[in-house]
Image (tube, grey):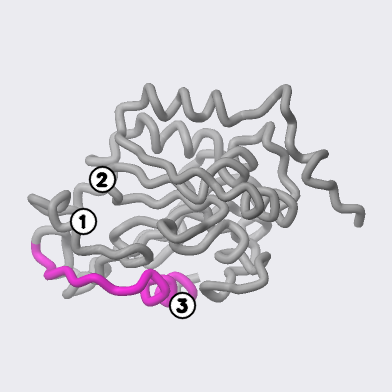
Amino acid sequence: MHKLSVSELVDREHHAWEELKELLDHGQNKYTYVPAQREAGEDTLYRLQVSTKSYLGAVAYETEGIVLDDGWITLLGSGGDRIFGSLTRWNGLGDKLCVPALEGMMIVAYDAAGGFFGMDMGKYGRTGHVYYFAPDTLEWESTELAYSGFINWLANGDLEQYYQTFRWKGWQNDMRQLQTGQVFAYYPPLWTEEGGGESSSKAPVAVEEAWKAALVGK
């Protein structure tokens, strides 16, 4: 199959980045993004074979990743020192893998509770739909959103309500405990009856540890 070149994938006329950035700038949820190293952005775009006309292509090409809501959610881009892994390395498309890839699913983001957002690439027969691996059920649940809708939700969704059972009073301050590539491990775990944002103790662990639960829960 012929692969499109980077110059074919970078659409200067209909580049989605400006629209996406405006959406985030005017959204109600705080965000910061790390600009991509040009070579890494081009490499990620080429390996994914997506155009910058799409939000996914724009994030891959323009950012190492985007961190939202006081660091609670990490949206994957081309990766770098301040973002753990990339769209390619999380999904078996890079030279170096950071985690075992999950067949039929493209991981696009993860959160501080050890939850993961993945785009269906054939696993559930709803290609392009974003699913959430919920650490309280250990199951993949459809968000009913495509990637562009997911970005809109990250910008304007009620994340406080969505994560209310995973969070605790003062969680924003505790986010400082996490290094790049770390999430919280809950004890008792969120999937137990006793587990919860307020009731469990939390300790930083590597996101790879949380990913093992997602692989088992697949």
Residue indicated by mark 1: 175
Measured Cα–Cα span from mark 2 to mark 3? 29 Å
Vertical order, 28 against 169 (above or below): above
Query: Is residue 19 shown left or right of residue 32?
Result: right
Q: Residue at x 75, y 49 (%)?
A: 49
Query: Is residue 69 shown left or right of residue 147?
Result: left
Q: Is residue 192 visible?
A: no
Task: Please say if the residues under marks 1 and 2 sit with CB atoms less than 8 Å apart.
Answer: yes
Residue indicated by mark 3: 216
Q: Residue at x 35, y 50 (%)?
A: 73
Task: Please say if the residues under marks 3 and 1 sit with CB atoms less than 8 Å apart.
Answer: no
Q: Residue at x 50, y 41 (%)?
A: 144
Residue range of the region highlighted in magenta in the rendering: 199-215
Instruction: Single out the mark in the foreground, 2 or 3.
Output: 2
Q: Position of residue 59 (x, y in %)?
A: 56, 42
Helix, strand or loop at label 2? It is loop
Residue indicated by mark 2: 70
Q: Amino acid at mark 2?
A: Asp
Label 1 environment density (alpha carbons within 10 Å; few <14, some 14–19, many ≥20): some
Measured Cα–Cα span from mark 1 to mark 2? 7 Å
The residue lying toward the viewer, choosing from 209 and 43, is 43
Helix, strand or loop at label 1? It is helix
Mark 1 vs 2, N-terminal side: 2
Asked whether residue 203 is drawn in magenta, I would say yes
Vertical order, 45 against 24 (above or below): below
Helix, strand or loop at label 3? It is helix
Asked whether residue 204 is drawn in magenta, I would say yes
